Image: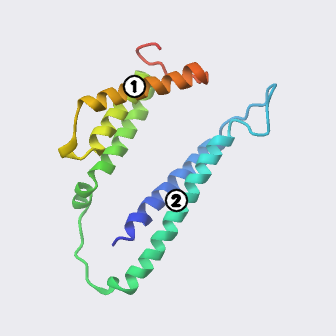
Amino acid sequence: MEYKKNLIPGIILAAFSVAYLGCSAMITPFTGPGATPLDNRAVPWLWGGLLLLLSVILIVRGIKERKAYMETAGKKIQSGRNLLEICKENKEVLCSFVFLAIYVALMEPAGFLISTALYVYAETVILTRPEKRNYVIPIIVAIVTAVAIDFVFVRLLNVLLPTGIIGF
């Protein structure tokens, strides 16, 4: 059943990248003075295309592994695992998706700084092994990361990020 480690994420990422490419196609191109052939849709198309390419590679790898599995060990009767067991084994991955959804939901009302700091903190804590967890260092890392990213994008690149409740 090792083939599922590449096949299932590949299918999910392919669906996500197709949806992402579909949404990026709806971006209105900038046609004002100074417009170039590479418009504001170029980078989303690049990222979406690369994600689709990588997901196709995962799918192909999963299919090859499945064929090899079916030829050798696939003939043995496997005891089925239920969804709860699979979720318990992959709780970090599930938590990461939940944290990402919360991060996206909090971006507008709470602002970039707060939501990014909370997201980086949550991911750092959940992805650290339980015996090595330290709750002070991730707080510092999360705050420094959020402030540094905000400084680079807002001050240096003049990219508007959501300000949220703190107003900056």
Q: Mark 2 or mark 1: which comes first in sequence?
A: 2
Report helix, strand or loop for mark 2. helix
Q: Residues within 10 Å of mark 2 (few under 14, many from 20)?
A: many
Residue labelled with disc 1: 144
Q: Answer with the quarter of the image where residue 146 lies.
A: top left
- The reply to whether callout 2 and callout 1 are in contact (CB within 8 Å) is no
| Residue furthest out toward the right | 33
Report helix, strand or loop for mark 1. helix
Residue labelled with disc 2: 55
Specify the amino acid type for callout 1.
Val
Asked if residue 154 lies left or right of residue 102, the reply is: right
- Residue 13: image tag: none
Q: Which residue does the image show at 48% across and 70% down from the upper left?
A: 61
Instruction: Give 98 or 151, whichever is nearer the viewer.
Output: 151
Asked if residue 7 lies left or right of residue 161, the reply is: left
Q: Residues within 10 Å of mark 1 (few under 14, many from 20)?
A: few
Vertical position of residue 61 compared to residue 168: above or below:
below
Report the quarter where the N terminus lies: bottom left
Label 2 – label 1 distance at C-alpha:
32 Å
Of the two numbered discs 2 and 1 in the rendering, the one whose residue sits closer to the viewer: 1
Report the number of numbered marks: 2
Q: Which residue does the image show at 41% across and 15% down from the upper left?
A: 165
Q: Which residue does the image show at 22% across and 75% down from the upper left?
A: 79
Q: Which residue does the image show at 55% across and 63% down from the upper left?
A: 56
